[in-house]
Image (cartoon, grey):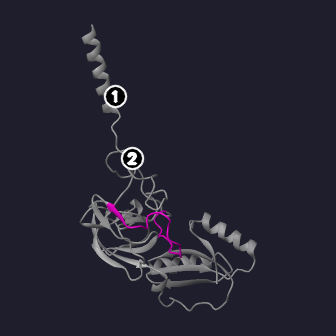
Amino acid sequence: MLNMNYIVLLFLIIVISGCSANYGRYQQKHDSTPTRKPTAVELQDAVPRTEVKSRGGNRHYTVRGKYYKVLQSAEGFTEVGEASWYGKKFHGHLTSNGEIYNMYGMSAAHKNLPLPTYVKVTNLANDKSVIVRVNDRGPFHQDRIIDLSYSAAYKLDMLKTGTTKVQIQAITEQTVSPPLVKKSNIKGNYIQVFATSNEDVAKKTSQAISSLYKYPTEIMRISQLYKVKVGPIEDSQELQSILEQLKSQGYPEAFRVIF
């Protein structure tokens, strides 16, 4: 009887151990594709803006015995190599700079760029491009240079292959190009509605918004990015009202700017 009890106890321990496999801080062992596709709003490019460096993730570090140096500045940074993407396994977990990874956001991981950094990523296989915000470290594979969010990979049409050759171009204040149209000299409060790497989309967006409001719209080109803004709007209450309307109409990243 004693031997039988011992066998039963040993069996239970084995079963329990098998049911509680330890995958570290993640709930699943292998990464996987989300159950739904990104929405139109989730496929909008990240909107570059001036940000201070994150407190976390900007020191030199070592992973798997290899030492990585973090760049002091992203100015003039370009790189060509293989891109991969990461999804459901990492969704909801902390990124290297302490934010929460959202696989439907326009974000990315890079081994050396300062956090955060905005970059334009172009799929060299089909010439599709996207603007993402780098807020994480990786990918720690010798042949890959950037890990993209699910939405970014979807927009670049690289999900079937898993990886693709890309070109990365950092977007910084020093890479500002001449404006696409003549810049307004009128100072005041504006709303930046939308930003995209596609000039045609920017023009169509500008036309659509100008038909809705009495205020002029303007397209500004900054590096590889086209920004659509509305204004100037003197009345602060009206500005707030228009801002809320725009956010509810599919422009959640719209925000107030002062010139």
Q: Quadrant of residue 72?
A: bottom left
Residue ID for mark 2: 26
The x, y position of residue 53, in whole percent, is 50, 71
Magenta-drawn stretch contains 60:
yes
The x, y position of residue 236, in whole percent, is 74, 74
What element does badge 2 sit on? loop
Going 43% across and 81% down the picture, which residue do you hit?
224
Q: Quadrant of residue 253?
A: bottom right
Residue 211's disc is none
The x, y position of residue 200, in whole percent, is 46, 80
Residue ID for mark 1: 16
Magenta-drawn stretch contains 63:
no
Residue type indicated by callout 2: Tyr
Residue type indicated by callout 1: Ile
For the magenta stretch, what is the residue range? 42-62
Q: Main secondary structure of the magenta part?
A: loop
Q: Nearer the viewer, residue 136 or 48?
A: 136
Q: Nearer the viewer, residue 126 or 253?
A: 253
The x, y position of residue 112, in whole percent, is 36, 70
